[in-house]
Amino acid sequence: MKKILFAAAESAPFYKTGGLGDVMFALPKALVNQAYDVRVVLPYYPRKMPEAFVNELQDVTHFTVRVGWKNEYAGVKMLHRNGVTYYFIDNLTYFDRDGLYGYPDDGERFGFFQMAVIEMLEKIQFIPDILHLNDWHTAFIPVLLKDKYAWIDALRHIKTVLTIHNLKFQGIYDPVILDSIFGIGRQYFNESGYKYYDTVNFMKGGIEFADKVTTVSPSYAQEIQTPEYGEGLDGVLRANSYKLAGFLNGIDTQVYDPATDSNVRYNYDLANLDKKKLNKRYLQELVHLPQRDDPLFIVISRLTRQKGMDLLLQTLDNFLVQQNVQMVLLGTGDQDLEADFKWMQDRYPAQLSTNIRFDEKFAQQMYAGADFILVPSAFEPSGLSQMMGMRYGTVPIVHETGGLKDSVQPFNEFEDTGTGFGFVNYDAATLGKIMTYAHQIYTQQPEAFQRIIKRDMTADFSWRKSAQLYVGLYNELLHA
């Protein structure tokens, strides 16, 4: 049985801040059914893990990791779930904090984590055939395997895969970390290594040194090779395009199922879609909006400019004035955008509900009760909310980029095809037009709109298809 170890900074159901956490929960579970020994290693954030999981943890071993001039404790905890073994690297100095990221010492924190992952392998007697890394927090591991730990025979045959979930975040630091954290020389501090101008770039190192590089949608794999989306690494990605592939993320169709979801007030499926209307009434009641049959739009997103929230604000005033619609927004993000949405709610209290928080249960209730979900991201490596919306019969309106383009087929009223509404030109006027057009289809062509819903709910966004693509990639590496 082939062995795969995933390394990441987060994973549901233990803790997550976004799509990475969802993927780290669903993909390993899908691969268990492909006859792999699948394991995952994560940092242990004691303040963030639900108590039920804390009580399941078993202490496996502990050791020290040399971080520059210091010896740092590294405990290894373990639990089993859904056929997957999870390991957690314990160090209170680095991980006993209120948040997962965003600290001045993140370079040291995740530098320690990456060394601990490698040094853990022999101690737990699990040498993986494939080490599957995710984003910059683990992207330096291929470098370390070929540099700091190249002398360890047991590790020499490990194949590495790096998945880029969002290229915007790269882990860029002063070269002093080579000494102060990793204790390595500068033999790879060059243009074909991890050197980025005069800095060390974790992501660049991973792209250069990993055996394979993947992104979370085919379109994003092409986009990041251009200056517009490449975040300064487009040239590096073009040079490594021979080992780059894009596989569209899936969603956990057992968790996200309107027929069985315990968070949904009135469960439903294609055979009893009328119950979706009951969920709409319930959602309106929850957020204190008038219970009307007008189209109900939702936004479940980080409130940032990358997610197109500034674009939405620019068009929202006119849209709410001109159309009989309601909108419910859920998320946190940039303080100025949060304040603007709150101000907009005060201006249109019968049409807009702004909810500045993270609330997974409420998000499920929104999916179940809404008619449209807005995902106007400037760029979107994969996107999951549009797939979740479709699963619940909530029609997506998306900017045609990255995974949004790959997962949503624009509606064509002449051919009666499509699963949602898309726009190409990234500006507020175009977004306003496509929202207005979607509103018209809802009100003037209700039968066509119902057919869109049915196509959405029968679309296959399970991890089964994506897992097969990863299996093919792993097999290619193992038989090379």
Image: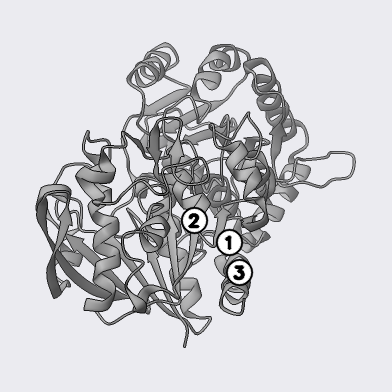
Mark 1 or 3 closer to N-term?
1
Callout 1–callout 2 Cβ contact below 8 Å: no
Q: Residues within 10 Å of mark 2 (few under 14, many from 20)?
A: many
Question: What secondary structure is marked by label 2?
Answer: helix
Q: CA distance from mark 1 to mark 3?
A: 35 Å
Mark sitting on residue 473: 3
Q: Residues within 10 Å of mark 1 (few under 14, many from 20)?
A: some
Disc 3 residue type (three-letter)? Leu
Residue placed at 14% from the left, 55% from the top?
Answer: 46
Lateral position of residue 176 relative to residue 72, left or right: right
Q: Residues within 10 Å of mark 3 (few under 14, many from 20)?
A: some
Mark sitting on residue 63: none
Indicate whether 11 appears above or below 99.
below
The picture places residue 28, in percent across and down from the top left corner, at: 44, 69
Disc 1 residue type (three-letter)? Asp
Disc 2 residue type (three-letter)? Phe
The picture places residue 95, in percent across and down from the top left corner, at: 17, 50
Indicate whether 85 appears above or below 147.
below
**Between 343 and 16, the one nearer to me in the picture:** 16
The picture places residue 356, in percent across and down from the top left corner, at: 33, 30
**Residue extending furthest bottom?**
1
* Residue 151, image quadrant: bottom left
**Between 200 and 323, the one nearer to me in the picture:** 200
- Residue bearing mark 2: 209
Mark sitting on residue 269: 1
Q: CA distance from mark 3 to mark 2?
A: 17 Å
Mark 1 or 2 closer to N-term?
2
Lateral position of residue 156 relative to residue 117, left or right: right
Indicate whether 463 appears above or below 92.
below
